Amino acid sequence: MLWFCYKYGASSSSSRRTNRAASTKQPLVSLLFFEIGFLLISGIRTQERLTGWEYNLRERGFTVVKGVISYERATQYQQKAYDWLKSFGTELNFDRPETWIKENLPVQSKANTFYGYGVNHEKFMWDARQEPGVLDAFATIWGSNELLVSFDSLNITFPNRKDVPRLGPWEHIDQSPFRKGLLCVHGIIVLSPSGPEDGGLVVYPGAHNLMDEFFNTQTDKSTWERLDKWNFNDAQLSWFAARGIQPHKVCAEVGDLILWDGRTIHYGSEPTEKSSQIRTATYVAYTPARLATKETLKKKAEILAQWGGTTHLPHDRIRTRDVKTYLEDGTRDPRDRDEPIEKPEMTDKLLKLAGVKKY
Ligand SMILES: O=C(O)CCC(=O)C(=O)O
Ligand SMILES: [Fe+2]
């Protein structure tokens, strides 16, 4: 469906134009015709009635696409993720909560993600990224099979850990206020049951539709940053609450794909005291390859060559970063790795998704 491109792509058409103009220097006239044609076609498509998950994603700003991966395969990915976590030769035992402590784990972010040691490029991560059901969902959203993917991280959250403080809500969006319209649809491949008490995504349905108004009326432009992140404080959340926008825990099953509009306020919640589920999830996001400039693609290729990670955003603001993993005291983790344990096969499909090969 092209509705997304219309509703969101059109409103971000200036950035698409900039990107394309910057990368290919197409003549202005043909570019103009393309844009007009694009808007006409997508305008017509928008008249179509959307149903199911597409409707929810557009109207509510999030959705769950059921069973994009079979239960068996999803469980295999979960097992691979656990094997990876156990590969550091520590006392970690998934059946013994007393071993779920920092000393037994590789370096993890406060948000419970693993992002170092080349994990973003382990074969199981790439296999999950290339699952046909996942790719189909994003191809439907963007009306294109020619997609780029983010080199995103793995989330394994142990419930009720005693050695670290509980992570409270961290309401945010991963989009700078300078960006108008939709920048990215974010995704989570669900590898563990995510019921009301389990760890998982919390969203503020409907927030995406109010985001421009919020930034224009409730914030001082001088505080805006180019960084694709905005954290909301209580007063700002009250503004949304006054408009009926409330937090909602997304419930999903193993093999489901959670999608959300990048302007939907959200955060990853830890399991409550009542849950004993180990949250397991991978983040995936895809955008049309045509949105990326040559420079961006070059950076993605460099990052892949170093087995480094990126943010959720596949096609823009790609930064080469230090890929080494450091301990809290600033020294390099002696367990650090220069490459994944099990490397993915560098197929044409993978290299196109990574932005290394042209479509
Ligand atoms: O863990 C989650 O469900 C959300 C993570 C998230 O919002 C982020 O990494 O930006
Ligand atoms: Fe986020």
Image (tube, rainbow, N blue to C red):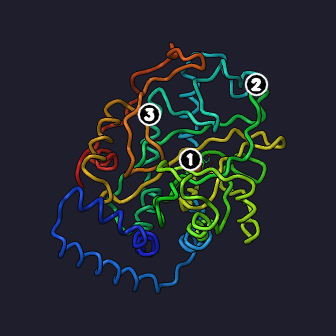
Q: Which residue is mark 1?
A: 72
Task: Tell me the amino acid under the disc marked 3.
Answer: Glu
Query: Under tag 2, what secondary structure?
Result: loop
Amino acid found under the numbered disc labelled 2: Asp
Q: Which residue is mark 2?
A: 163
User: Which residue is pictured at 67% across the width and 41% down the height?
Assistant: 279
Residue 211 has which mark?
Answer: none
* Residue at x 74% of width, y 47% of height: 198
Q: Is 307 located above or below residue 191 in the figure?
A: above
Residue 128: percent from left, percent from top: 47, 46
Q: Amino acid at mark 1?
A: Glu
Distance of label 2 from label 3 (alpha carbons): 28 Å
Residue count near mark 2 (Cα–Cα under 10 Å), binned few <14, some 14–19, many ≥20: few
Q: Residue at x 34, y 82 (%)?
A: 41
Does the beta carbon of the residue at mark 2 sit less than 8 Å from ligand 1?
A: no
Number of residues whose C-alpha sits closer than 10 Å to that of mark 3, classed few (under 14), some (14–19) or many (20 or more)? many
- Where is residue 194 drawn, in percent x and y? 69, 50
- The Cα atoms of the two marked residues, 2 and 1, are separated by 33 Å
Task: Check whether the beta carbons of the residues at disc 1 and disc 3 lie within 8 A of each other.
Answer: no
Furthest toward the left, the residue is: 27
Q: Nearer the viewer, mark 2 or mark 3?
A: 2
Left or right: residue 164 compared with residue 148: right
Residue at horizontal 52 percent and vertical 21 percent from the top: 326
Q: Is residue 174 left or right of residue 195?
A: left
Residue that carries the numbered disc 3 in the rendered image: 122
Residue 63: x and y in percent read 60, 64
Work out whether residue 356 or residue 70 is closer to the camera in this orientation and state it. 356
Q: Is residue 133 above or below residue 163?
A: below
Query: Label 1's element?
Result: helix
